[in-house]
Image (cartoon, rainbow, N blue to C red):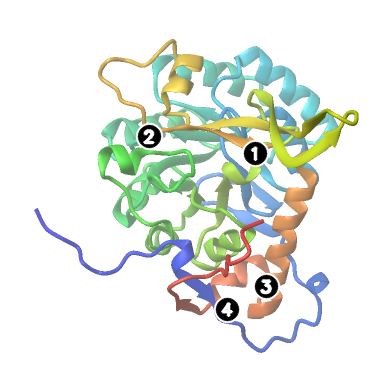
Amino acid sequence: MRIQDDIQLDYCDVLLRPKRSALASRSQVDIIRKYTFKWCPKTIEATGIISANMFTTGTMEIAREMQKQKLFTALHKHYSAEELLAFLKENAKQFGNNDLIFISSGVSDTDYEKLQTVMKSGLVDNICIDVANGYSPYLVNYVQKVRTAWPQALIMAGNVVTGDMCEDLILSGADIVKVGIGPGSVCTTRKLTGVGRPQFSTVIECADAAHGVSGMVCADGGCTVPGDVCKSFCAGADFVMLGGMLAGHEESAGELCTKHFQTGEVDLIDDKTCAMKLTEKQYKKFYGMSSEYAQEAHYGGMKKYRASEGKVVEILFRGPIEHTLLAILGGLRSCMTYIGAKRLKDMPKCATFYRVNRQLNNIFGEE
Protein backbone atom coordinates (compact mmCIF):
# COMPACT_ATOMS: atom_id res chain seq x y z
CA MET A 1 0.00 0.00 0.00
CA ARG A 2 1.17 3.53 -0.75
CA ILE A 3 -0.31 7.00 -0.81
CA GLN A 4 0.16 9.36 -3.73
CA ASP A 5 -0.19 12.62 -1.87
CA ASP A 6 -0.04 15.29 -4.58
CA ILE A 7 -3.36 17.14 -4.71
CA GLN A 8 -5.85 15.94 -7.32
CA LEU A 9 -8.24 18.53 -8.72
CA ASP A 10 -11.76 18.66 -10.11
CA TYR A 11 -13.27 21.28 -12.43
CA CYS A 12 -14.69 23.15 -9.43
CA ASP A 13 -11.18 23.55 -7.97
CA VAL A 14 -9.88 25.80 -10.74
CA LEU A 15 -10.75 28.89 -12.77
CA LEU A 16 -9.15 30.18 -15.97
CA ARG A 17 -7.03 33.32 -15.88
CA PRO A 18 -8.12 35.95 -18.45
CA LYS A 19 -5.42 37.34 -20.73
CA ARG A 20 -4.95 40.18 -23.20
CA SER A 21 -6.48 39.15 -26.48
CA ALA A 22 -6.55 40.40 -30.05
CA LEU A 23 -10.00 38.86 -30.43
CA ALA A 24 -12.62 41.59 -30.40
CA SER A 25 -15.68 39.34 -30.75
CA ARG A 26 -16.87 35.80 -30.12
CA SER A 27 -17.56 35.59 -33.85
CA GLN A 28 -13.81 35.65 -34.53
CA VAL A 29 -13.04 32.31 -32.87
CA ASP A 30 -13.13 28.99 -34.69
CA ILE A 31 -14.70 26.16 -32.68
CA ILE A 32 -14.51 23.71 -35.58
CA ARG A 33 -11.38 21.58 -35.36
CA LYS A 34 -9.89 19.40 -38.10
CA TYR A 35 -9.31 16.05 -36.39
CA THR A 36 -6.71 13.60 -37.72
CA PHE A 37 -6.06 10.33 -35.93
CA LYS A 38 -3.26 7.85 -35.19
CA TRP A 39 -4.85 4.80 -36.80
CA CYS A 40 -7.97 5.94 -38.64
CA PRO A 41 -6.98 7.54 -41.97
CA LYS A 42 -9.93 9.94 -42.30
CA THR A 43 -10.20 13.58 -41.27
CA ILE A 44 -13.28 14.97 -39.49
CA GLU A 45 -14.10 18.66 -39.08
CA ALA A 46 -16.28 19.22 -36.02
CA THR A 47 -16.43 20.50 -32.44
CA GLY A 48 -15.34 17.73 -30.09
CA ILE A 49 -18.41 17.52 -27.86
CA ILE A 50 -20.00 14.06 -27.68
CA SER A 51 -23.38 13.04 -26.32
CA ALA A 52 -22.73 10.14 -23.95
CA ASN A 53 -23.66 6.60 -24.94
CA MET A 54 -26.17 6.31 -22.09
CA PHE A 55 -29.69 5.11 -22.78
CA THR A 56 -31.10 8.56 -22.02
CA THR A 57 -28.59 10.65 -24.01
CA GLY A 58 -27.18 8.40 -26.72
CA THR A 59 -30.41 8.60 -28.72
CA MET A 60 -31.00 8.95 -32.42
CA GLU A 61 -33.11 12.04 -31.76
CA ILE A 62 -30.25 13.75 -29.93
CA ALA A 63 -27.84 12.64 -32.66
CA ARG A 64 -29.83 14.56 -35.28
CA GLU A 65 -29.68 17.75 -33.22
CA MET A 66 -26.00 17.33 -32.35
CA GLN A 67 -25.05 16.98 -36.02
CA LYS A 68 -26.77 20.27 -36.87
CA GLN A 69 -24.17 21.94 -34.64
CA LYS A 70 -21.28 19.75 -35.93
CA LEU A 71 -21.19 17.77 -32.67
CA PHE A 72 -20.84 14.01 -32.09
CA THR A 73 -23.14 11.38 -30.59
CA ALA A 74 -22.20 7.95 -29.24
CA LEU A 75 -25.39 5.93 -29.68
CA HIS A 76 -26.24 3.68 -26.74
CA LYS A 77 -25.67 -0.09 -26.85
CA HIS A 78 -29.31 -1.07 -26.66
CA TYR A 79 -30.39 -0.38 -30.22
CA SER A 80 -30.68 -3.54 -32.30
CA ALA A 81 -28.55 -3.97 -35.41
CA GLU A 82 -31.68 -3.48 -37.52
CA GLU A 83 -32.55 -0.21 -35.78
CA LEU A 84 -28.99 1.06 -36.19
CA LEU A 85 -28.84 0.20 -39.87
CA ALA A 86 -32.17 1.88 -40.59
CA PHE A 87 -31.04 5.03 -38.76
CA LEU A 88 -27.62 5.11 -40.42
CA LYS A 89 -29.14 4.86 -43.90
CA GLU A 90 -31.59 7.70 -43.23
CA ASN A 91 -29.00 9.82 -41.41
CA ALA A 92 -26.47 9.53 -44.25
CA LYS A 93 -29.12 10.86 -46.64
CA GLN A 94 -29.91 13.78 -44.33
CA PHE A 95 -26.35 14.79 -43.34
CA GLY A 96 -24.28 13.35 -46.18
CA ASN A 97 -22.38 10.85 -44.02
CA ASN A 98 -22.25 9.32 -40.53
CA ASP A 99 -18.89 10.79 -39.52
CA LEU A 100 -20.33 12.30 -36.31
CA ILE A 101 -21.93 9.05 -35.13
CA PHE A 102 -20.25 6.43 -32.92
CA ILE A 103 -21.66 2.91 -32.64
CA SER A 104 -21.20 1.62 -29.08
CA SER A 105 -20.04 -1.86 -28.22
CA GLY A 106 -19.30 -3.89 -25.13
CA VAL A 107 -16.75 -6.69 -25.22
CA SER A 108 -18.96 -9.79 -25.23
CA ASP A 109 -19.37 -12.19 -28.15
CA THR A 110 -22.92 -10.90 -28.63
CA ASP A 111 -21.64 -7.31 -28.80
CA TYR A 112 -19.06 -8.32 -31.40
CA GLU A 113 -21.64 -10.11 -33.55
CA LYS A 114 -23.85 -7.02 -33.58
CA LEU A 115 -20.85 -4.84 -34.38
CA GLN A 116 -19.97 -7.12 -37.30
CA THR A 117 -23.49 -6.80 -38.71
CA VAL A 118 -23.44 -3.00 -38.52
CA MET A 119 -19.89 -2.54 -39.78
CA LYS A 120 -20.51 -4.89 -42.72
CA SER A 121 -22.93 -2.30 -44.11
CA GLY A 122 -20.14 0.25 -44.68
CA LEU A 123 -22.42 2.98 -43.37
CA VAL A 124 -20.31 3.92 -40.34
CA ASP A 125 -16.61 3.83 -39.33
CA ASN A 126 -16.75 5.10 -35.73
CA ILE A 127 -16.76 2.61 -32.84
CA CYS A 128 -17.03 3.38 -29.11
CA ILE A 129 -15.85 0.42 -27.00
CA ASP A 130 -17.27 0.99 -23.54
CA VAL A 131 -16.62 -0.97 -20.35
CA ALA A 132 -16.83 0.04 -16.70
CA ASN A 133 -13.30 -1.07 -15.80
CA GLY A 134 -10.78 -0.23 -18.50
CA TYR A 135 -7.98 -1.85 -16.53
CA SER A 136 -9.11 -5.39 -17.25
CA PRO A 137 -7.08 -7.16 -19.95
CA TYR A 138 -10.19 -7.98 -21.95
CA LEU A 139 -10.48 -4.31 -23.04
CA VAL A 140 -6.98 -4.22 -24.55
CA ASN A 141 -7.61 -7.59 -26.21
CA TYR A 142 -10.93 -6.41 -27.62
CA VAL A 143 -9.42 -3.18 -28.96
CA GLN A 144 -6.77 -5.24 -30.75
CA LYS A 145 -9.43 -7.56 -32.14
CA VAL A 146 -11.56 -4.67 -33.45
CA ARG A 147 -8.54 -2.86 -34.93
CA THR A 148 -7.49 -6.04 -36.75
CA ALA A 149 -11.02 -6.57 -38.09
CA TRP A 150 -11.50 -2.94 -39.23
CA PRO A 151 -8.09 -1.27 -39.79
CA GLN A 152 -9.72 1.91 -41.14
CA ALA A 153 -12.13 2.41 -38.22
CA LEU A 154 -12.09 5.31 -35.77
CA ILE A 155 -11.93 3.56 -32.38
CA MET A 156 -12.66 5.19 -29.02
CA ALA A 157 -12.22 2.98 -25.93
CA GLY A 158 -12.38 3.35 -22.15
CA ASN A 159 -12.69 4.14 -19.33
CA VAL A 160 -9.38 4.73 -17.54
CA VAL A 161 -7.85 7.54 -15.46
CA THR A 162 -4.07 7.09 -15.75
CA GLY A 163 -1.54 7.88 -18.44
CA ASP A 164 0.00 4.42 -18.62
CA MET A 165 -3.30 2.79 -19.51
CA CYS A 166 -4.04 5.50 -22.09
CA GLU A 167 -0.76 4.66 -23.79
CA ASP A 168 -1.51 0.92 -23.70
CA LEU A 169 -4.93 1.36 -25.31
CA ILE A 170 -3.63 3.70 -28.02
CA LEU A 171 -0.70 1.43 -28.87
CA SER A 172 -3.18 -1.46 -29.00
CA GLY A 173 -5.26 0.27 -31.66
CA ALA A 174 -7.45 2.96 -30.07
CA ASP A 175 -7.45 6.42 -31.64
CA ILE A 176 -9.23 8.03 -28.66
CA VAL A 177 -9.23 6.93 -25.01
CA LYS A 178 -12.25 7.74 -22.87
CA VAL A 179 -11.10 8.94 -19.44
CA GLY A 180 -13.06 9.20 -16.19
CA ILE A 181 -14.04 6.82 -13.39
CA GLY A 182 -16.86 8.02 -11.19
CA PRO A 183 -17.20 11.73 -12.11
CA GLY A 184 -20.68 11.43 -13.63
CA SER A 185 -23.71 12.86 -11.83
CA VAL A 186 -25.53 9.49 -11.75
CA CYS A 187 -22.45 7.33 -11.22
CA THR A 188 -21.88 5.93 -7.71
CA THR A 189 -18.69 3.95 -8.42
CA ARG A 190 -16.62 6.11 -6.08
CA LYS A 191 -19.18 5.74 -3.30
CA LEU A 192 -19.52 1.98 -3.68
CA THR A 193 -15.94 0.98 -4.48
CA GLY A 194 -13.74 3.84 -3.27
CA VAL A 195 -12.11 3.92 -6.72
CA GLY A 196 -11.77 7.01 -8.89
CA ARG A 197 -9.86 10.19 -9.53
CA PRO A 198 -10.87 13.88 -9.77
CA GLN A 199 -11.57 14.59 -13.41
CA PHE A 200 -9.50 17.72 -14.03
CA SER A 201 -6.27 16.01 -12.92
CA THR A 202 -7.29 12.92 -14.88
CA VAL A 203 -7.60 14.90 -18.10
CA ILE A 204 -4.25 16.66 -17.66
CA GLU A 205 -2.28 13.45 -17.12
CA CYS A 206 -4.12 11.34 -19.67
CA ALA A 207 -4.02 13.99 -22.40
CA ASP A 208 -0.28 14.42 -21.93
CA ALA A 209 0.29 10.67 -22.14
CA ALA A 210 -2.02 10.14 -25.12
CA HIS A 211 -0.59 13.02 -27.13
CA GLY A 212 2.89 11.62 -26.52
CA VAL A 213 1.97 8.53 -28.56
CA SER A 214 -0.10 10.44 -31.17
CA GLY A 215 -3.45 9.54 -29.61
CA MET A 216 -6.31 11.58 -28.20
CA VAL A 217 -8.52 11.61 -25.11
CA CYS A 218 -12.22 12.11 -24.50
CA ALA A 219 -13.03 13.51 -21.05
CA ASP A 220 -16.09 11.51 -20.01
CA GLY A 221 -18.16 12.89 -17.14
CA GLY A 222 -17.94 15.56 -14.49
CA CYS A 223 -19.11 18.59 -16.49
CA THR A 224 -22.03 20.36 -14.81
CA VAL A 225 -21.97 23.76 -16.58
CA PRO A 226 -20.58 25.06 -19.91
CA GLY A 227 -17.55 26.45 -18.07
CA ASP A 228 -16.51 22.89 -17.16
CA VAL A 229 -16.49 21.98 -20.85
CA CYS A 230 -14.17 24.94 -21.47
CA LYS A 231 -11.86 23.87 -18.62
CA SER A 232 -11.74 20.33 -19.99
CA PHE A 233 -10.62 21.49 -23.44
CA CYS A 234 -8.07 23.79 -21.78
CA ALA A 235 -6.74 20.86 -19.72
CA GLY A 236 -5.94 19.05 -22.96
CA ALA A 237 -9.06 17.05 -23.78
CA ASP A 238 -9.62 16.57 -27.50
CA PHE A 239 -13.24 15.54 -26.93
CA VAL A 240 -15.66 16.10 -24.04
CA MET A 241 -18.49 13.65 -23.42
CA LEU A 242 -21.67 14.96 -21.77
CA GLY A 243 -24.46 13.03 -20.07
CA GLY A 244 -26.39 14.95 -17.42
CA MET A 245 -26.05 18.27 -19.24
CA LEU A 246 -27.91 16.77 -22.21
CA ALA A 247 -30.47 14.73 -20.26
CA GLY A 248 -34.04 15.82 -19.57
CA HIS A 249 -34.70 17.25 -23.01
CA GLU A 250 -37.38 16.57 -25.58
CA GLU A 251 -34.92 14.47 -27.60
CA SER A 252 -33.62 12.58 -24.56
CA ALA A 253 -34.95 9.18 -23.62
CA GLY A 254 -36.33 8.51 -20.14
CA GLU A 255 -39.80 8.32 -18.66
CA LEU A 256 -41.63 11.66 -18.55
CA CYS A 257 -43.69 12.32 -15.43
CA THR A 258 -45.74 15.22 -14.09
CA LYS A 259 -45.72 16.38 -10.45
CA HIS A 260 -48.00 18.87 -8.74
CA PHE A 261 -46.83 21.34 -6.11
CA GLN A 262 -48.56 23.77 -3.79
CA THR A 263 -47.66 27.38 -4.58
CA GLY A 264 -48.51 28.79 -1.16
CA GLU A 265 -51.28 30.89 -2.72
CA VAL A 266 -55.04 30.30 -2.59
CA ASP A 267 -57.93 30.59 -5.03
CA LEU A 268 -61.25 31.93 -3.75
CA ILE A 269 -64.02 29.64 -4.96
CA ASP A 270 -66.84 31.56 -3.25
CA ASP A 271 -67.35 33.67 -0.12
CA LYS A 272 -66.84 30.69 2.17
CA THR A 273 -64.51 28.40 0.24
CA CYS A 274 -60.95 28.67 -0.92
CA ALA A 275 -58.51 26.15 -2.34
CA MET A 276 -54.75 25.96 -2.38
CA LYS A 277 -53.28 26.83 -5.78
CA LEU A 278 -51.28 24.07 -7.49
CA THR A 279 -48.66 24.22 -10.19
CA GLU A 280 -47.37 21.34 -12.24
CA LYS A 281 -43.86 20.54 -13.45
CA GLN A 282 -42.63 17.84 -15.78
CA TYR A 283 -39.57 15.67 -15.14
CA LYS A 284 -37.60 13.09 -17.09
CA LYS A 285 -35.76 10.12 -15.62
CA PHE A 286 -31.97 10.04 -15.99
CA TYR A 287 -29.97 7.10 -14.73
CA GLY A 288 -26.50 5.59 -14.68
CA MET A 289 -25.97 2.58 -16.89
CA SER A 290 -24.57 0.55 -13.97
CA SER A 291 -27.56 1.33 -11.77
CA GLU A 292 -29.99 -1.34 -10.64
CA TYR A 293 -32.69 0.44 -12.64
CA ALA A 294 -30.61 0.11 -15.84
CA GLN A 295 -29.76 -3.52 -15.09
CA GLU A 296 -33.45 -4.34 -14.69
CA ALA A 297 -34.46 -2.38 -17.79
CA HIS A 298 -31.75 -3.51 -20.20
CA TYR A 299 -29.93 -6.60 -18.89
CA GLY A 300 -32.67 -8.77 -17.40
CA GLY A 301 -31.92 -7.89 -13.79
CA MET A 302 -29.00 -7.33 -11.45
CA LYS A 303 -26.58 -10.30 -11.32
CA LYS A 304 -25.85 -11.59 -7.82
CA TYR A 305 -22.12 -10.96 -8.17
CA ARG A 306 -22.72 -7.29 -9.05
CA ALA A 307 -23.75 -4.23 -7.08
CA SER A 308 -25.42 -1.08 -8.32
CA GLU A 309 -22.88 1.60 -9.29
CA GLY A 310 -25.39 4.17 -10.47
CA LYS A 311 -28.53 5.99 -9.39
CA VAL A 312 -31.79 7.26 -10.83
CA VAL A 313 -32.72 10.95 -10.74
CA GLU A 314 -35.57 13.01 -12.13
CA ILE A 315 -34.47 16.08 -14.11
CA LEU A 316 -36.78 19.03 -14.66
CA PHE A 317 -37.94 18.82 -18.28
CA ARG A 318 -35.91 21.30 -20.33
CA GLY A 319 -37.71 21.31 -23.69
CA PRO A 320 -35.82 21.12 -27.01
CA ILE A 321 -32.08 20.45 -26.70
CA GLU A 322 -31.06 23.13 -29.22
CA HIS A 323 -31.11 25.92 -26.61
CA THR A 324 -28.78 23.94 -24.32
CA LEU A 325 -26.36 23.17 -27.16
CA LEU A 326 -26.21 26.82 -28.20
CA ALA A 327 -25.54 27.85 -24.58
CA ILE A 328 -22.64 25.39 -24.34
CA LEU A 329 -21.14 26.55 -27.63
CA GLY A 330 -21.68 30.20 -26.67
CA GLY A 331 -19.79 29.63 -23.43
CA LEU A 332 -16.98 27.95 -25.34
CA ARG A 333 -16.64 30.88 -27.74
CA SER A 334 -16.69 33.38 -24.90
CA CYS A 335 -14.02 31.45 -22.99
CA MET A 336 -11.80 31.50 -26.07
CA THR A 337 -12.03 35.29 -26.30
CA TYR A 338 -11.16 35.63 -22.59
CA ILE A 339 -7.97 33.56 -22.92
CA GLY A 340 -7.00 34.63 -26.44
CA ALA A 341 -7.49 31.30 -28.20
CA LYS A 342 -8.50 31.78 -31.82
CA ARG A 343 -8.87 28.03 -32.51
CA LEU A 344 -10.30 25.21 -30.40
CA LYS A 345 -7.00 23.34 -30.64
CA ASP A 346 -5.16 26.37 -29.20
CA MET A 347 -7.05 26.38 -25.89
CA PRO A 348 -4.47 24.38 -23.85
CA LYS A 349 -1.64 26.60 -25.13
CA CYS A 350 -3.53 29.73 -24.05
CA ALA A 351 -4.73 28.42 -20.67
CA THR A 352 -3.45 29.37 -17.24
CA PHE A 353 -5.44 28.17 -14.22
CA TYR A 354 -5.91 29.50 -10.72
CA ARG A 355 -6.55 27.04 -7.90
CA VAL A 356 -9.61 28.30 -6.01
CA ASN A 357 -11.67 27.45 -2.94
CA ARG A 358 -14.95 28.06 -4.76
CA GLN A 359 -15.98 29.20 -8.20
CA LEU A 360 -19.58 30.36 -7.78
CA ASN A 361 -21.51 32.72 -5.50
CA ASN A 362 -24.79 30.91 -4.79
CA ILE A 363 -26.22 33.28 -2.17
CA PHE A 364 -29.41 33.74 -4.19
CA GLY A 365 -29.58 30.14 -5.33
CA GLU A 366 -28.53 28.39 -8.51
CA GLU A 367 -30.16 28.56 -11.93
Crowd class of label 3 (few under 14; some 14 to 19; many from 20; radius 10 Å): many
Residue 12 visible, this orientation: yes
Q: Calculate the distance from the C-alpha at mark 3 to the C-alpha at mark 4.
A: 9 Å
Check disc 2 and give the amino acid type: Ala
**Name of the residue lying farthest toward the left:** 1
Q: Please give left or right for residue 60 compared with residue 203 in the image.
A: right
The residue that mark 1 highlights is 73
Crowd class of label 2 (few under 14; some 14 to 19; many from 20; radius 10 Å): some
Labels 4 & 1 near each other (Cβ < 8 A):
no
The label shown at residue 336 is 3
Mark positioned earlier in the residue sequence (4 or 2): 2
Mark positioned earlier in the residue sequence (3 or 2): 2
Check disc 3 and give the amino acid type: Met
Question: As displayed, is residue 164 above or below residue 107?
Answer: below
Labels 4 & 2 near each other (Cβ < 8 A):
no
The residue that mark 2 highlights is 132
Residue 134 visible, this orientation: no
Q: Please give left or right for residue 113 compared with residue 23 in the image.
A: left
Q: Position of residue 74 (x, y in %)?
A: 60, 36
Q: Name the secondary structure under disc 1.
A: strand
| Quarter holding residue 63 | top right
Labels 1 & 2 near each other (Cβ < 8 A):
no
Check disc 4 and give the amino acid type: Cys
Q: Name the secondary structure under disc 4.
A: helix
